[in-house]
Image (tube, grey):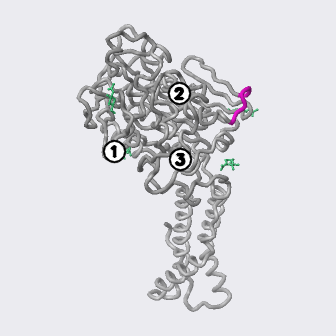
Amino acid sequence: MKPPPPPPPSSSSSGGGVLRKSRGLSPYLFILLAFILFVTILYGEDFSCFFGGQFDSNYHQLHQTFSSSSSTTTSFAVRARVLLVHVCVCVFSVLEKKGENQKLAFALTGEEEGDRKPGGGGGGVGNCDVFSGRWVWDDVARPLYEESECPYIQPQLTCQEHGRPDKDYQHWRWQPHDCSLPSFNATLMLESLRGKRMMFVGDSLNRGQYVSMICLLHSIIPENSKSMETFGSLTVFSAKDYNATIEFYWAPFLLESNSDDAVVHRIADRMVRKGSINKHGKHWKGVDIMVFNTYLWWMTGLEFKILQGSFEDKEKDVVKLPTEEAYRMAMKSMLRWVKKNMDPDKTRVFFTSMSPSHGKSIEWGGDENGNCYNETKMIDDLTYWGSDSRKSIMSVIGQVFGNSKVPITFLNITQLSSYRKDAHTSIYKKQWTPLTDEQLANPVSYADCVHWCLPGLQDTWNELLYSKLFYP
Ligand SMILES: *[C@@H]1O[C@H](CO)[C@@H](O)[C@H](O)[C@H]1NC(C)=O
Ligand SMILES: *[C@@H]1O[C@H](CO)[C@@H](O)[C@H](O)[C@H]1NC(C)=O
Ligand SMILES: *[C@@H]1O[C@H](CO)[C@@H](O)[C@H](O)[C@H]1NC(C)=O
Ligand SMILES: *[C@@H]1O[C@H](CO)[C@@H](O)[C@H](O)[C@H]1NC(C)=O
């Protein structure tokens, strides 16, 4: 800071003195006014704190403190400095408030929300950890739709159609400990998607959540104004009257990999190419609501192969990294892509944590050779966490998001899904190859303990997404 202008002579209380005093202040005032004008225009903020009561009392207190020990000759310079300090404090507090109160895209403010969450006042779920809670039996309001009413569910997830004898798995509702989830309003969701694109990017588990979202919405769209089409890696559901699309893009690693064929992708020797997110990312541009996941395909062991050159190279330059580090690299690529391509003021990005599987019943105190087959009850132990959900990967997710300012809403569905050993498709799904007699004799051997029946658990993931979208 420049030194204050020379103090006016103490004897001057005449008109000339006043003139000189105001001349002494003017550079500060000028800078101040210019600064206020600049910030006001730039941020369009309410700077009432300049003029409010707090200003006056701050000002007088500070002024008295300063001037009591100094002669009146310096009081104007001091006053000017105090004023400048105050303005800085005021500007910072306003900008800080702006940061805190910045409205996320799609978030509802008090007035616009037609649908208030039951028993939750109007406050949103912002301060409540919606992922911490318990499952409660709800025979009345669950399931949110019938399996037979949603033609979009792929035959790998239609459990009833494939002979599942029980239905209890459809009747559980997630109840957070400290609040209630808003009820899913399909009209509100579709209206918010008017003229917009929502996209799920990831693996078959994300495809399950995608289909669940369509099932939650499609019944309010007339038959002749909706369609679903697949073009290679991209599946597009269109609601024509709304000019809205809900899409799924197959990219199980987010990065380019040798498992990118949306149909033929069962490759044992998996590999991803370093820094290749734009290979797929170029198809994600212009999306308004993005939902990423990636996890299961990384789980081939303790190390993962990273390709340094191109998949076309004859001599492939491959390095092995600890799986956690390979995963971290992909997460960072995703964040960079989001930062570059998504406008934080108009769009939202979600990331869904790992979906647990239930392949070893010994982990929940069951049979030594069992898995999710024949399981119709959930796990009661609130601390249960299966070995298939690697904690080290969860830490990587926490670290990567923790160190980033890119606004991504994290859907931490792992714990609440870990209880749901009853919710997998098990043997009740379309089998692509006929089962052998040996398999038929031992259903455990071909039970799918990774994917989830619809309706079911993944509708809850979308209720959580819904709550974070509108009531963050
Ligand atoms: C659902 O949302 C629409 C659009 O915001 C609103 O008009 C309607 O009242 C809501 N329905 C319920 C049951 O809250
Ligand atoms: C339909 O939505 C797309 C974005 O998904 C937008 O670019 C386009 O202008 C919209 N068309 C009309 C007619 O509103
Ligand atoms: C399925 O579990 C029930 C107990 O819940 C048991 O009585 C039955 O034998 C089991 N069926 C098979 C085929 O394992
Ligand atoms: C997700 O939730 C689990 C269980 O509550 C917790 O242990 C984990 O740290 C959370 N993950 C992140 C990245 O916050």
Query: For this rendering, which residue is in front, 292 or 241?
Result: 241
In this figure, which residue is indicated by the disc labeled 2?
Answer: 281
In this figure, which residue is indicated by the disc labeled 1?
Answer: 380
Mark 3–mark 1 CB contact (< 8 Å): no
Which numbered disc, 3 or 1, marks the residue closer to the eye? 1
Q: In this orientation, does residue 220 appear?
A: yes
Query: For this rendering, which residue is in front, 192 or 401?
Result: 192
Q: Residue 225, position in %: x, y?
A: 73, 28
Q: In this orientation, does residue 307 appear?
A: no
Which label's residue is closer to the chain start, 3 or 1?
A: 1
**Amino acid residing under circle 3:** Lys
In this figure, which residue is indicated by the disc labeled 3?
Answer: 468
Label 1 sits on a secondary structure element that is loop
Residue drawn at the location 59% of the way across and 32% of the way down:
215
Q: Residues within 10 Å of mark 2 (few under 14, many from 20)?
A: some
Q: CA distance from mark 2 to mark 3?
A: 24 Å
Which label's residue is closer to the chain start, 2 or 3?
A: 2
**Amino acid residing under circle 2:** Gly
Segment colored magenta: 220-225
